[in-house]
Amino acid sequence: MRTRRTVQVYVDGFALYKGLLQRRFPEHKWLDLNSLSQRLFPHREVVGVKFFTAQLKPQTNDPGVGQRQQVYWRALRTVGVDIIEGTFRFNRQYLPKSPEELDASGKVVTVKVKRPEEKGSDVALASHLIIDAFEMVADSYAVITNDSDLVAPVRMLSERGHALALVSVANGMYNKAFDCVGLETVRQIRRGTLAASQFPTELIGVDGKTIRKPSTWP
């Protein structure tokens, strides 16, 4: 018999990385998402954590990025995190080399770049959220994101009586687009919570092999 309310957690991996881990708290990339969820909702039973992300390809300036990601995924699987993969697409664009640098005709000099764009994760997150809510896998549902593309599914579920929580990954605020969706609660991820939710430097994977924190991570 359940004694506490339950919560299912959905993590927008790209938003979490861009919003918190890339520049603000890079020392906390070795993040245990199950432990984080427990700390964000200490009075609820976390019945599951779903992590929506995409596999990174090696980059010329960072050839080990894909390998580090796979190590992290192995660590997440040790605590039962469900990893749902989207894809990355590289869009070719011309961007200013420098606002002050002009060519002979007086035009800004541009360079051709490939910019990664994650595809499919927001749709996958919305789909899992809706299906899980209809199947009543938990009493409440928490989405870790700041992506306004998820406003519509969150609002539709809230209007149908489901309890929804937003965990913002923005710097000290949340996306005001979510104001209209009838959220049960809005929470922030603090530095101390991240620090307390780290994996140990070494752990044993589901295959029985040792997993070590990437040496280039602080």
Image (cartoon, rainbow, N blue to C red):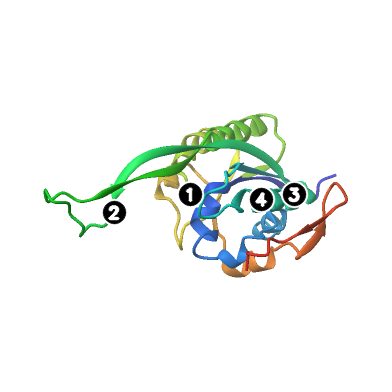
Q: Which residue matches tag 2?
A: 97
Q: Callout 3, which amino acid?
A: Arg
- Percent across and percent down for residue 48 are 73, 44
- Percent across and percent down for residue 209 are 85, 52
Q: Callout 4, which amino acid?
A: Gln
Cα distance between the residues tagged 4 and 2: 30 Å
Which circle marks residue 14 in the picture? none
Determine the residue positioned at 50% across, 65% down. 24
Element marked by disc 4: helix
Is 12 left, or right, of 213 in this rendering? left
Q: Which residue matches tag 4?
A: 67
Cα distance between the residues tagged 1 and 3: 26 Å
Sequence-first tag of 4 and 3: 4
- Percent across and percent down for residue 4 are 76, 51
- Decide which of 157, 32 is in the foreground and name it: 32
Sequence-first tag of 1 and 3: 3
Determine the residue positioned at 17% across, 54% down. 102
Q: Nearer the viewer, mark 4 or mark 3?
A: 4
Q: Which residue matches tag 3?
A: 74
The reply to whether dot 1 and dot 3 touch (C-beta < 8 Å) is no
- Decide which of 185, 30 is in the foreground and name it: 30
Q: Callout 1, which amino acid?
A: Asn
Which circle marks residue 146 in the picture? 1
Q: Callout 2: few (<14), some (14-19), or many (20+) C-alpha neighbours within 10 Å?
A: few
Element marked by disc 2: loop
Element marked by disc 1: loop
Cα distance between the residues tagged 4 and 3: 11 Å
Sequence-first tag of 1 and 4: 4
* Residue 72 seen from this side: yes
Q: Nearer the viewer, mark 3 or mark 2?
A: 2
Cα distance between the residues tagged 1 and 2: 30 Å
